[in-house]
Each structure stands twice: as structure tokens, then as C-alpha cells.
């Protein structure tokens, strides 16, 4: 069995958690590789000399699991790489909340269960996000959490139209819109007043960001088989951006059409405990 350990070096200082996990897994006769989730070139980060770092793109194809050390952002970043090879992910929470993480830093001993197959897989739906411009697809990405359209200029609002299978859902002026999965319902969508949805459900959630209308201020929970189209009505004197799972913002132009549908692929999360989603919500949100 081979497991890739991927620590966020800004969260896992000195890669201490990753090294502790490697010792636990190696003692259980599991082969491990430590791979950083992103390039640290140009940073002032220093790593222990005795730690050998491998390349993610070389180790993931033959891996049985990917263990991420950090917050939900680390898992979101890793999901795209892991899904390309069908590798399940296990999150170790080193952040402040960590809804997707299965274990806390003090529970690393649970990783020994991986060696004997004492775990289950939980499947999470993803969204396929594309931008069409003048009849061409100019952007495509997958979202485990959400796709967010936001205004660019301070003090201005944008007029947004959302359609479901070409049928109008809502139109409003505001700061933007969040299209999220059930997994992402406890992230930005929840902060915007959206509902909390069980992460294993299959729905598409539409949550407006600071709408300038009480009537259209509600979220919509749609069937997973819908195809959503989001348009910014007039960008002649304004700007708007798309961000997928908190990634780099993509600038939108007037006339661009954002299409969102359920992706064919799903993220596989490893479960080692019997904690229910409701226990996690109570624990995480109760301490915020």
C-alpha cells in the first residue's frame, strides 16, 4: 500500500504532522511519500534536511490514498489532482474549522486503520463550471465547494440573471452569486445566508451575495440534474469575476455565459470515524 502525504507548509510548520503520520504508517508497513500541494519557490520556507520531498504528479498515479494536512482549502486544492487519478482523500485538520477533514492533529494514530482497510469512502458531488464567450468555451474547471461570481468595483452592484434549464430562476442587483454543492453549503454560501445541506446529498444551491431586494434575498436549492446559466446583464461600466473553490479570479466580460452542471466525477473522501455530519456541525460551528 502506498499513501501520499501532502502537508500545507504554512499550516504544518516544519512538516511535523506529516512526519508523525509517516512514522505511524511506516510502522504499519505502509509506503509513504511526502509531496507539497503547491510550489514554494520564491518563499522563505525552510524544510528539515532529512525529509525527502517527492513530486505530486509522479507519486499520485500509483497511490492508494492522499492524506492532506491543513484546512479545507488544502483539501479543495488537492481534490483536483486526486480526482484525476481516482485517488481517495483523507483530511487532517490543522486549520480553524475544517468541515471536510476527518481527523484532528491529535488523532493521527487513527491513520493506522488505513493499513488494514478499516475505513469507508464517502462520495461528494462536484460541479462542472464553464464560461462561454462568443460561442466558444474559454474556461473550464471543477468545483467541490462552489463557483462564485462577484463584482469588481467597490461601491457598485451588478445585475445578475440565473436560469435553470433555460427557465428564469431569479434576477437581482447585488454583489454577486454563489453556486455551491452540498459540501460547499457550510462555506461561503452559509456566510451569505444559505442553507446547510447534508454533504452527501446531490443538490445545487444558489445563494445571492448582498442582494438589494428583500424579495430576491433567498437561496434556492435545485435538483442536481439542472444546468444553471448565470449572466451579468450589463458590464459596460463595471467588472465581475469568477472564482472556483477560492482559486484565482477569472475576469468576466459583458455577454459571457457561465454554465454550471453536476460533474461526472465525484470526490472520494476517506472516513475513519463514525462521527455524523450533525456532530461535526455542532462541534465546528459551536466554537466559532
Image: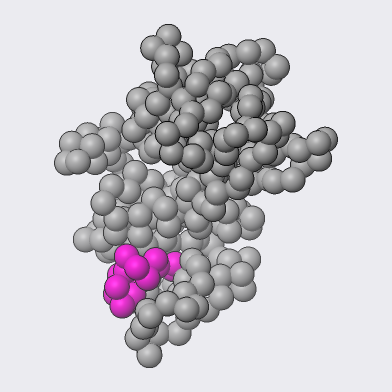
Q: Quadrant of residue 240?
A: top right
Tell whether 34 sits left or right of 18. Answer: right
Q: Residue furthest left?
A: 287
Q: Nearer the viewer, residue 146 or 277?
A: 146
Position of 101 relative to 221 (above/below) = below
Residue extending farthest bottom = 49
Q: Position of residue 243 (x, y in %)?
A: 54, 44
Q: Compared with residue 252, is residue 76 higher up or lower down, i.e. above or below?
A: below
How many numbered markers are drawn? Answer: 0
Q: Is residue 213 visible?
A: yes
In the image, which residues are magenta? 1-20
Rendering quarter of residue 15: bottom left
Q: Is residue 144 visible?
A: no
Residue located 49% across and 39% down the image? 153
Which residue in the rendered view is the most extreme toward the front? Answer: 237
> What residue is rendered at 43% in x and 38% in y?
154
Residue closer to the observer: 152 or 182: 152
Residue at coordinates 40% horizontally, 26% vertically from top-left? Answer: 210
In this orientation, which residue lies closer to the viewer: 190 or 27? 190
Colour style of the rendered protein structure: one colour
Task: Provide residue 138's location: percent of width, then percent of height.
Answer: 74, 45
Judge left or right: residue 222 versus residue 52.
right
Q: Is residue 256 left or right of residue 90?
A: right
Residue found at the very far right of the displayed protein: 135
Q: Is residue 250 magenta?
A: no
Q: Quadrant of the C terminus?
A: top left
Position of 82 relative to 151 (above/below) = below
Residue 211, how many percent across, how many down? Answer: 43, 21
26 versus 100 height, above or below: below
Q: Position of residue 1 (x, y in %)?
A: 51, 68
Residue at 26% in and 61% down: 105
Amino acid at each position: 500500500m502506498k499513501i501520499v502525504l501532502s502537508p500545507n507548509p504554512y499550516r504544518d510548520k516544519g512538516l511535523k504532522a506529516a512526519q508523525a503520520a509517516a512514522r505511524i504508517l511506516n510502522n504499519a508497513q505502509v509506503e509513504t511519500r511526502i509531496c507539497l500541494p503547491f510550489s514554494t519557490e520564491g518563499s522563505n520556507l525552510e524544510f528539515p534536511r532529512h525529509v525527502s520531498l517527492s513530486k505530486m504528479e509522479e507519486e499520485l498515479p500509483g497511490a492508494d490514498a492522499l492524506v492532506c494536512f491543513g484546512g479545507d482549502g488544502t483539501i479543495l486544492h488537492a481534490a483536483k489532482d486526486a480526482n484525476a487519478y481516482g485517488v481517495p482523500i483523507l483530511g487532517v485538520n490543522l486549520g480553524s474549522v475544517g468541515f471536510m477533514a476527518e481527523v484532528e492533529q491529535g488523532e493521527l494514530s487513527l491513520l493506522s486503520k488505513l493499513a488494514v482497510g478499516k475505513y469507508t469512502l464517502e462520495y461528494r458531488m462536484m460541479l462542472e463550471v464553464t464560461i462561454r464567450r462568443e460561442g466558444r468555451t474559454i474556461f473550464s474547471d471543477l468545483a467541490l465547494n462552489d463557483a462564485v461570481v462577484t463584482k469588481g468595483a467597490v461601491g457598485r452592484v451588478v445585475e445578475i440573471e440565473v436560469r435553470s434549464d433555460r427557465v428564469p430562476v431569479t434576477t437581482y442587483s447585488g454583489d454577486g452569486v454563489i453556486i455551491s454543492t452540498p459540501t460547499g453549503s457550510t462555506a461561503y454560501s452559509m456566510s451569505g445566508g444559505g442553507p446547510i445541506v447534508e454533504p452527501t446529498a446531490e443538490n445545487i444551491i444558489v445563494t445571492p451575495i448582498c442582494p438589494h431586494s428583500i424579495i430576491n434575498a433567498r437561496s434556492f436549492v435545485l435538483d442536481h440534474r439542472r444546468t444553471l446559466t448565470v449572466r451579468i446583464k450589463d458590464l459596460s461600466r463595471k467588472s465581475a469575476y469568477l472564482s472556483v473553490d477560492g482559486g484565482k479570479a477569472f475576469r468576466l466580460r459583458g455577454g459571457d455565459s457561465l454554465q454550471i452542471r453536476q460533474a461526472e466525477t465525484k470526490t472520494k473522501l476517506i472516513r475513519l470515524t463514525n462521527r455524523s455530519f450533525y456532530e461535526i456541525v455542532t462541534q465546528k460551528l459551536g466554537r466559532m
